[in-house]
Image (cartoon, grey):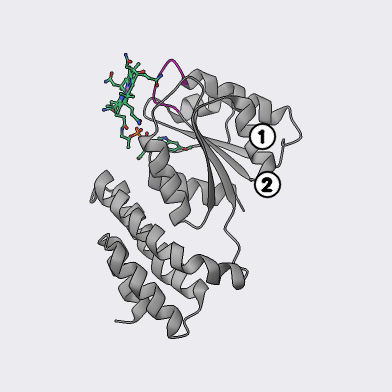
Amino acid sequence: MTIIEQIKENLMKGKAKDVKEQVEQAMKQGALASDVLNQGLLAGMSIIGEKFKKNEVYVPEVLIAARAMKAGMEVLKPALAAAKVQPRGVVVIGTVKGDLHDIGKNLVGMMLEGAGFKVVDAGINVEPEKFLELARANNAQLIGVSALLTTTMTNMKAVVEQVKQSDLAGKVKVMIGGAPLTQAFCDEIHADGYSPDAASAADLAKKLVV
Ligand code: B1M
């Protein structure tokens, strides 16, 4: 097995220390940072995402794989910056106004990072204006809004409307998700996309940012 394949395998097993050491080793051996990223870290995270979708792994496994990815990314970041490897896109993600649930939102953020996006975390109980401000400040192409309550999901509409009525219209798309949501609700508030889980959220983000 090559060192990059070992990185992929160990990431899937959540072995953060091994991943970190093997990324260091791969870089010392002269591997390209982009190969370590795409064929090692992102490839492993993508398999974990697929398994999560099929209920073959659960939230804890995704969290430890994401932790291993972060450990590898810490080593890789300077080399990626030097090689001018650009993120796939920038996503501002947050939980909608009035809502304090963030476990699902954090998981979506990790899967987006695993898919190569730069993720700006707006936190919880986020006012619509804050989403727009952060999108402008970070040149984001996407805003991701999470809601876990039937009483707060309706607040997502304001985010979609404010984006469409602002200078960001046509430049920034809004994707939504969270347990009480449906595609029908997404259509009703004219959001650009809905996904039922964190792995599909990463797939959706890739489709929305072309
Ligand atoms: Co609350 N809570 N909670 N809660 N809580 C629920 C959501 C609830 C279903 C429990 C119940 O009654 N059975 C219920 C909502 C009922 C409803 O509206 N239909 C509820 C309630 C009522 C409340 C309070 C009102 C309780 C009270 O105070 N009376 C209160 C509200 C506070 C507020 O937000 N203003 C409240 C508070 C809390 C805690 C603070 C105690 C805690 C949150 C801690 C935290 O997040 N840091 C909490 C928790 C933990 C839950 C449950 C138990 C678990 C939620 C969770 O994290 N799930 C939940 C019941 C349950 O689901 N069994 C419940 C795991 C997580 C990985 O799943 O968030 O669905 P989820 O995310 C998934 C997908 O939905 C999707 O991907 C994720 C991964 O696959 N997804 C996206 C999520 N966001 C996405 C965004 C995307 C795409 C996909 O694109 C942007």
Q: Position of residue 23 (x, y in %)?
A: 39, 73
Label 2: how many Cα within 10 Å (few below 14, some 14–19, many 20+): some
The residue where tag 2 is placed is 139
Residue on which disc 1 sits: 133
Q: Is residue 182 left or right of residue 186?
A: left
Left or right side of 127 for 74: left
Task: Look at label 1 and name its amino acid.
Answer: Glu
| Disc number for residue 87 | none
Tell me: residue 74, above or below residue 53: below
Query: Where's ligand 1: which quadrant?
Result: top left
Q: Position of residue 75 (x, y in %)?
A: 45, 68
On screen, residue 88 versus residue 111, left or right, reads right
| Residue in the picture at 23% in, 51% down | 56
Residue 197 seen by the camera = yes
Amino acid type of disc 2?
Asn
Please report whichever mark, 1 or 2, sits nearer to the chain's N-terminal start: 1
Instruction: Please give the name of the residue rendered at 41% of the width and 41% of the height, measured from the top-left corner.
Output: 106
Count of number-bearing discs: 2
In the image, which residues are magenta?
Answer: 147-152
Q: Residue furthest bottom?
A: 29
Q: Secondary structure at mark 2?
A: loop
Vertical placement of residue 114 versus 132, above or below: below
Residue shown at 47% from the left, 50% from the top: 112
Q: Is residue 148 magenta?
A: yes
